[in-house]
Amino acid sequence: MRNLIMLEWRKLKMPILLTIIAGTLLSIILCSTIYKSYALEHQLEVWEVGFTIFNVIFPLISVLPTCWLMYFERKNGFLKYTLPRASKKQYLLSKWLVISSSAFFTMFIISFAGVVTALYIVQPIDVFLGWISPETGKPAPSLIHFHFAAEIFLESPLLYGFLLSFWKGILSVIPATMGYVFSLYSKNLFVILTGPFVYLILENFTLQIVGLDHLRLAVAFEPTMILVEDVGLPSFIFGPVLAVLVTILYVIYMKFKVKEDIYTI
Amino acid sequence: MVLLLFETALDVISLFLIMFSVGREKVSLKRGAIQWLVVILIFGLWNQPLFNFDSSNINAILHRDFEILPVQSISGLIGLLFLTLLMNSFVLKASHIEIIFVTMLGFIIWFLIRLFTVATIDLFTISQMTIRPLTLILAICFYWLMKKKFSTYIRNDFNHFVKLIIVSVFAFILYIVLSSRNRNEFIIDPAFIAFVVLIVLAMLVFLFYEQKRTQVMENRMKAIEKYIPIIDELVVEVRSRQHEFSNKLLAISSILQANENMENAREQVSKYVENVQLTSGQHELLNMDHKVIAGFLYTKMKRAEQLNMKLKFERSVSVSAFPCEDYDLIEVLGILIDNAIEACFGGDTILIRMVQLNDRYELTVSNPAEYMTNEQFMQLFKLGYSTKSIHSDNRGFGLYNVQQIAKQYGGKIIARNDQKNGPMITIGIQF
């Protein structure tokens, strides 16, 4: 198993490392620039406004560097070549482990690089208090009232950034898994590479239309997208569970309805 | 609501026409095309804030940021790009890489058309409601032009340089559109942008020269690989004849011994030797100093022989002295000889001349033909003009290409009437 994982890593290390480097650079650049046109109250908000684009494209970052490999291995018959040499389950599992862990680390590193940039590289912001306290009638800090996990955000921003980056990493495993599952059955490379992203967009708009904003996968990824009152445990659970269910349904559909087999193409 | 649907539909149809024209796909009401339209239309509509907010905002939607992009948000734009890519992969018959570049090229054209439309409407202060219909009209014109006039220009696969240009222009236009649309969100230090632009430009210039150099090398290699084996065939043919020489010498000796009369002996020997000698063409090709050109001319000579025609060579200058690449010389010779063969009948002779006049090198091909006026000669070099067939779209490129090659090397085209062995026309190139 260890050898299989190393083999997969050797195949994918270049695109993964390139994605990490490019993503980290982009994160640093965006976190160092975008905040300038915002009125902010806390230094870590620099990361929140700079990281917005990643909240949309995270399925692409998770899928693009890795999920193409399975498609080509099926297409060029390499998968059949592995049959007498490695157990099917172990081979597929080792691939999933590499893909999912790379998605986790890529997103975690990109996100945490943004946190570090916001807290230690960007110059201290000019604090702007835009909220008028109804009690005093004067401008007052609003984050304590309106921000998700306000206490930890204000008192231990590095820990907050670390934990949320870690969570973002975990959530990135879901689209990576979805892309991997698509790559096991689909014959269209673009379905594999853009499928999870298109799923996120469709799920986003569908849940918005039916008024279930707070249950979107994007909200689970970035809970500050919606009002703090709406954030709850379902916001973190529903989106990921729905994505996993869709993935399972896809597998069932392909396996039992379409009768598509991974090892034939 | 109806207005929004109508406006979005116009945008989607425009995009559809552009994608299909750059993807070399014929527009038809097939299932794939309808699916393409429906999916992108639904996405475009879903992405309108109308569906997310109060429907009383419709006027604000129509007049806010909706002029350039058919979607309302950055996530919507990214979604549109990838959804279009996905749908293109179902309907366009192309490789994966080509689909990516076709999609990018389609968006570049769409953005340019839309930016032009918006600028025109601003300039002439026309109602904003005309933006989408005008975009659609321009997209239809583009589709028609691509289909009728410029289809040959998008027939070849994109080379590396074109791909790089597409990526750079796409990124640049996307940045312009996004920064103009969201002034607050996409402000990047101008110095950084200037730095990136300079780096990209330097890379493009380097890659342009590198690409050109590689292309020249590839063409040379292709020509060598194709025609060297042919001249080797000619050498083998000559060698096989040399094996018979001892028998031939014995036969000549027998003729001389059998004939007491010297005149008879001479006559019989000269008749016998006629069959042994190489043709003048073969002799010329074997003595040619350029194996690739010789190999190429040998194929043409064989072709002419099959059609009962003769190729005659007159050469007073080394082929290597011609100041152009081998593959260009082959292209010129190929076009001129093919044209001459098509214009000739069995028994005709085609004359190929390579001569030096003062400090200029001249390559001409002459074939028997009726007298032509200067105007007729000028017509021959026009793009798309052909004397052979009006039923094919792929004619009329040959002499135009000769003219382009002449321009490339600072040369001239030659077209004149000759009267050497009856009426002939001579067409060629002077370097």
Image (cartoon, coloured by chain):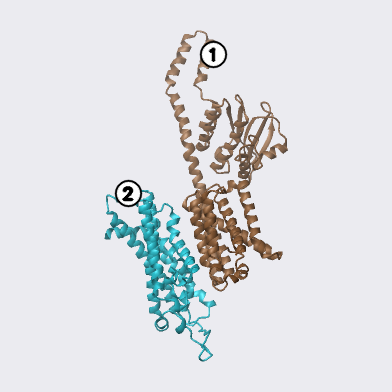
Image quadrant occupied by the C terminus of chain B:
top right
Q: Which residue is mark 1?
A: B267
Q: What's the mark number on residue B241?
A: none
Query: Which amino acid lies under the numbered mark 1 shown in the image of this protein?
Result: Glu
Nearer mark to the viewer, of 2 and 1: 2
Q: Which residue is mark 2?
A: A80
Query: Which one is nearer the viewer's eye here, B108 or A74?
Result: A74
Residue A206 placement, left or right of B420: left
What colour is chain B? brown
Query: Which amino acid lies under the numbered mark 2 shown in the image of this protein?
Result: Lys
Residue B194 in sight from this viewpoint: no
Image quadrant occupied by the N terminus of chain B:
bottom right
Query: Which one is nearer the viewer's eye here, B422 or B282?
Result: B422
Q: Residues within 10 Å of mark 2 (few under 14, many from 20)?
A: some
The residue at the far top in this view is B260
Note the chain letter of the cyan one: A
Secondary structure beneath label 2: helix
Q: Residue B68: percent from the left, percent from the top?
A: 60, 64
